[in-house]
Image (cartoon, rainbow, N blue to C red):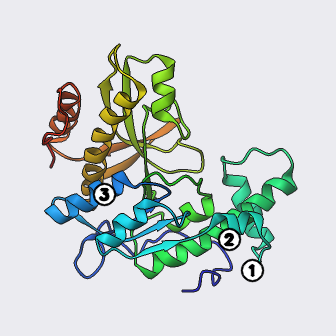
Amino acid sequence: MSSHAQGHEVSGRTDHSASSGASGRLRVAVLVSGGGTNLQALIDRAKQGTLEADIVCVGSDRASAYGLVRAQEAGIPTFVVSYEKYLKGPMDEPVEDTLVASVDTRQRILHDSDEDSRRDRLRRLIAAEREILAHLEAHGADLVCLAGFMRLLTPFFLGRFRRNDRPGVVNIHPALLPAFPGQHGYRDTYRYGCKWGGITIHFVDEGEDTGPVIAQAVYPIWDEDACEDVQQRGLHLEHVMYAQVINWIARDRVRLVPRPGGRPRVCIEDPSYREVVGSWVEAAFRPRPDVELRRT
């Protein structure tokens, strides 16, 4: 499908169940902006047969992203969509005013009080997202996993990956949300003087790092730690947690439960859930975290 064929916003991909494709496996697209260490961890687990999903493509907003090299070396199709072309250059294809206005009423990522400026930026973001969506749809992606993707997504994009009223875009964040949102979770946690750091994996919603939490884990921060030590301790958790969450989604064990008067809560229907989360915390206390953690 052409990236400019969508004249209006389309509802979620309800034609897919939790697992899709001829193999019946979940088809995952990964978006990166940089080195792609989480992507590499997923690729390694896929090769080991412990990732219960297929990585069908990897995309980036930066042609220089090393994550693209990791994907190419693993034989995974890649693509690049230059946001700079859309944000700074002329608009080659129109984005309808009605669509932009509809997205603006739902988004919580742009706060410019000038409506014309805000909507012009939204229009350009939507144009870039249409190009990304064309690639994802060409590869039949069921789930989008953000792995250091440094672009905020609009409700236009998110609406295309809702499935049976469940979000279809997942992000991993290096802090215990709602504390320390944004791009520098490790640095902000360390500079604040926290005694515990953490990792959050969440569904992406219309705000910045505000979506329903799927999984969290913590690790200690010792007095002698430098910021680099904190980051290394957290990265090990990231690599293990992301694969586990994808496996839970692939098995359809993730439920988004609405709560009256409050945020929806994500429930994991895995009998071993407590043991898995406990193993993450236990490993964070070991001198060498590169040991096998419990997974299901």
| Picture coordinates of residue 157, whole percent (x, y) | 57, 64
User: How far, Cα to Cα, is label 1 from label 3?
Assistant: 35 Å
Pick the front one: 236 or 64? 64
Check disc 2 and give the amino acid type: Ala
Judge from the rendering whether residue 123 lies leftward or rightward of residue 184; answer left or right: right
Residue at the disc numbered 3: 40
C-alpha gap between disc 1 and disc 2: 8 Å
Spatial CA distance of label 3 from label 2 is: 29 Å
- Crowding at mark 1 (Cα within 10 Å: few <14, some 14-19, many 20+): few
Residue marked by disc 2:
127
- Please identify the quarter of the rendering in which residue 11 is found: bottom right
Q: Residue at x 47, y 67 (%)?
A: 59
Q: Are marks 1 and 3 in contact (CB under 8 Å)?
A: no
Residue at the (84%, 55%) spot, across then down: 117
Q: Nearer the viewer, residue 128 or 222?
A: 222
Horizontal relation, residue 35 to residue 267: left or right: right
Residue 38 badge: none
The secondary element bearing badge 1 is classed as loop
- Residue type at mark 1 is Glu
Q: Give the x, y percent position of residue 277.
A: 22, 36
Vertical relation: 117 (above or below) 216: below
What amino acid is found at the position of numbered circle 3 in the picture?
Gln
Q: In the image, is residue 296 above or below residue 278?
A: below
Mark 1 or mark 3, which has the lower sequence index?
3
Q: Position of residue 76 (x, y in %)?
A: 34, 74
- Residue 260 in sight from this viewpoint: no
Q: Residue 282 is drawn in which quadrant?
A: top left
Give the secondary structure at mark 3: helix
Q: Residue 93's mark? A: 1
